[in-house]
Image (spheres, coloured by chain):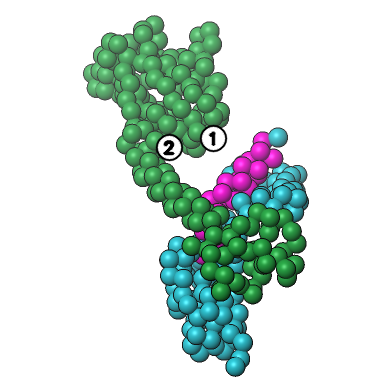
Chain colours: A green, B cyan
Amino acid sequence: MDDIRHDELAATASDNPHANARDSSPKPQKARSIDVDEDIAWQRRTWMIQRLGWLGMGGLVLAALTGVFGHGPVSWQQASDPAGLVRVEYERFERQLSEHTLKVDIAPGAATGGAVALRLNGAFLDATEMKEIVPRPQEERSAGRDVEYVFPVARPDQPATVRFVLKLKEARTIQAEIGLAGREPARFTQFVYP
Amino acid sequence: MDSVLRAAFIYFFLLIVFRIAGRRTLSEMTTFDFVLLLIIGEATEPVLLGDDPSVIHAAIVIITLLLLNIAMSLVKERFKFMEKLMDGVPTIIVEHGRLMQERMDRARVSRDDVMEAARRMHGIERLEQIKYAIVEVSGGITIVPQAEG
């Protein structure tokens, strides 16, 4: 209603008392004596953008609840190797340097000679900082760029679970391959937020 | 390099988020607003410092933030547009004792807020005694009383 052209007003010194003379208010009888650097068109645009911003913020919170930023239902995923012997529970979306647990379930019968050897690919290990492995491997051996962890298994007829507590150091997409030594691994992709 | 980028990201992120949240949000500080501000500070701290508690790191982060603030004030000084973009503009919400309701709704200012400011600053009793009420860039309400007589 009282759209004031302020670009020029703003350009001049705002403490100039004559600046108001150029205030082309639609209601001349209400020409303002007050020298306020008002720009209601700008202010309305600001209000509108703020409303949109609130919606955006609400959307972000809802998205965070679903887990697209990690640690939520959308993020919780499983991957299996083609033989179905290894199943990895992982997070599709992880966060840089946040400590989390990768759970590897090994089907009964996968163990040979009282031990099972899990192979993790080098690209994945490059991006991770291993904090702890439960149970502790009895042996860790290098296999090219990959590393094989050998775990003792008390009951080979029972499923076994190995937990890797780790941090992902780099914010990027990481291709992981986890499987039994000498077999096709379970492959999965993790995206790491900074 | 990392710490400078992190500090810069946080600076601009907070700048944008607080601009979107609007000026009423933290200007009239209630006790809870103050607590909220502390929590926001707590949430920001590990991002800025991470797992590097060295003196040099803290110094880099602090200097980066201060330098950014100086740079932004210079930019605002130089370009009026940037000042409007970052700080907003004042808005008149009462004119000659008449409430501009639509603007007040948008600015999230109630009649009570206006009257409170009027009482506090000028001991004004009635709305008609207000010539202008303005929501300032800082978020406070300024009252210009009607001339006597």
Answer with left or right where residue B81 lies relative to residue A78.
right
Tell me which segment is drawn in magenta.
B2-24
- Residue underneath mark 1: A194
Going by the numbered disc 2, the residue's amino acid type is Phe
Instruction: Residue at 27% x, 19% y: name it.
Output: A107
Q: Position of residue B76 (x, y in %)?
A: 71, 52
Instruction: Residue at 36% x, 45% y: name it.
Output: A62
Instruction: Residue at 60% x, 67% y: name it.
Output: B136
Of B91 and A187, which appears nearest the observer? B91
Chain of the residue that carries numbered disc 2 in the rendered image: A
Residue B5 sits inside the magenta stretch: yes
- Residue underneath mark 2: A69
Residue A50 sits inside the magenta stretch: no
Residues at circles 2 and 1 in contact by the CB criterion of under 8 Å: no
Chain of the residue that carries numbered disc 1 in the rendered image: A
Of B33 and B44, which appears nearest the observer? B33
Q: Position of residue A81 (x, y in %)?
A: 32, 14
Q: Residue furthest bottom?
A: B149
Q: Residue furthest left?
A: A157
The secondary structure making up most of the magenta span is helix
Instruction: Residue at 43% x, 37% y: name it.
Output: A69
Q: Earlier in the sequence, mark 2 or mark 1?
A: 2
Q: Is residue A132 visible?
A: no
Answer few, some or many: residues within 10 Å of disc 2's Cα (few below 14, many 20 plus, some between 14 and 19). Answer: many
